[in-house]
Image: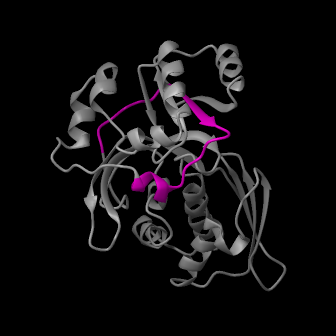
């Protein structure tokens, strides 16, 4: 079985406050993109699970990879036969794009189908919420409003289909989620993000739909602001950092000049993805 774990971008991200358990309550809108990894899942002829990675370098031992963490969480609910996982990494890590979380979600969905385990979406979501806060989102293939720590998902009336999305990842700059939280501010006095997005024309989002991680991360990684400026100069309707960074995206109402974008961002050591939502 071959799956294509998608990445995501965040339309706004409000950090509402720190919880007693040490986590933060947030509000964000997650939107899937087609920038995907490739995950193959096959029954193993050995007596144990295995994980083989190719593509981008993975900077962790197999047992710490979110694929294996998903398997372990799933094994607490049902028996998983020995399985071999072949993960080809395409989506960059340390980008705020949820690549690892998508791998975990595809692992759970793939095992459920491969072995006819009969888990429903709610059960799979419960399993994935123990793996990572944004993992459950990747069970869905459309925008969702995420609240709580990011695991509480609800439908939202937003249609970005047909827009061109450009995602830019500075190759020399990354930031951990912990670093991003250390330099952010919290504010629970604003209008709900969902209201701002639904009731504001996309061409006016730039002034009102904000990512609370962005100011602090931009101080650590100056390239974030530079990338945003370059995307705005090329006609983006809206630009933002995704999640805790360091990837930045722009939304366009037209197809962009690929040669211009690749040339401009290659010269400043950035990777570029161009696709449609």
Q: How is the image coloured?
A: one colour
Q: Is 97 on the left or on the right of 149, as rendered? A: right
Residue shown at 66%/24% (left/top)?
A: 265
Residue 270 seen in the current view: yes
Q: Position of residue 116 (x, y in %)?
A: 59, 73
Q: Using the image as rendered, state which of residue 256 and residue 172 is in the foreground.
A: 172
Residue sitting at x 62%, y 69%: 111
Residue 220, image x, y percentages: 50, 43
Where 99 sits versus 111, above or below?
above
- Report the residue that reaches farthest toward the front: 219
Q: Is residue 146 above or below residue 237?
A: below
Was residue 181 drawn as part of the magenta stretch in this picture?
yes
Residue at (53, 84) in percent of width and height:
76
Looking at the image, which is closer to me, 263 or 51?
A: 263
Residue 78 is drawn in which quadrant? bottom right
Q: In the displayed structure, does residue 87 sit left or right of residue 116?
A: right
Question: Is 124 within the magenta?
Answer: no
- In x, y percent, where is residue 171? 67, 39
Q: Is residue 2 positioned above or below 119 on the image?
A: above
């Amino acid at each position: 079985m071959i799956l294509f774990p998608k990445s995501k971008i965040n339309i706004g991200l409000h950090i509402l406050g720190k919880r007693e358990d040490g986590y933060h309550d947030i509000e964000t809108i997650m939107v899937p993109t087609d920038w995907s990894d490739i995950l193959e899942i096959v029954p193993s002829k050995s007596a144990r699970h295995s994980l083989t990675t190719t593509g981008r370098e993975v900077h962790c031992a197999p047992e710490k990879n979110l694929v294996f963490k998903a398997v372990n969480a799933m094994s607490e609910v049902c028996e998983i036969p020995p399985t071999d996982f072949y993960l080809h990494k395409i989506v960059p890590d340390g980008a705020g794009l949820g690549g690892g979380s998508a791998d975990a979600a595809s692992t759970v969905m793939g095992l459920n189908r491969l072995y006819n385990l009969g888990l429903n979406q709610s059960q799979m979501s419960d399993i994935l919420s123990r793996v990572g806060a944004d993992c459950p989102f990747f069970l869905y293939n459309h925008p969702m409003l995420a609240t709580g720590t990011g695991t509480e998902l609800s439908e939202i009336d937003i249609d970005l289909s047909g827009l061109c999305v450009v995602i830019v990842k500075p190759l020399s700059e990354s930031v951990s989620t912990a670093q991003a939280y250390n330099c952010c501010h919290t504010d629970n006095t604003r209008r709900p993000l969902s209201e701002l997005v639904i009731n504001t024309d996309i061409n006016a989002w730039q002034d009102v739909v904000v990512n609370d991680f962005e100011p602090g991360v931009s101080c650590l990684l100056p390239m974030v602001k530079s990338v945003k400026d370059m995307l705005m100069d090329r006609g983006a309707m809206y630009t933002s950092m995704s999640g805790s960074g360091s990837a930045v995206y722009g939304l366009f109402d037209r197809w962009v000049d690929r040669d211009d974008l690749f040339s401009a961002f290659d010269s400043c050591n950035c990777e570029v993805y161009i696709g449609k939502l």
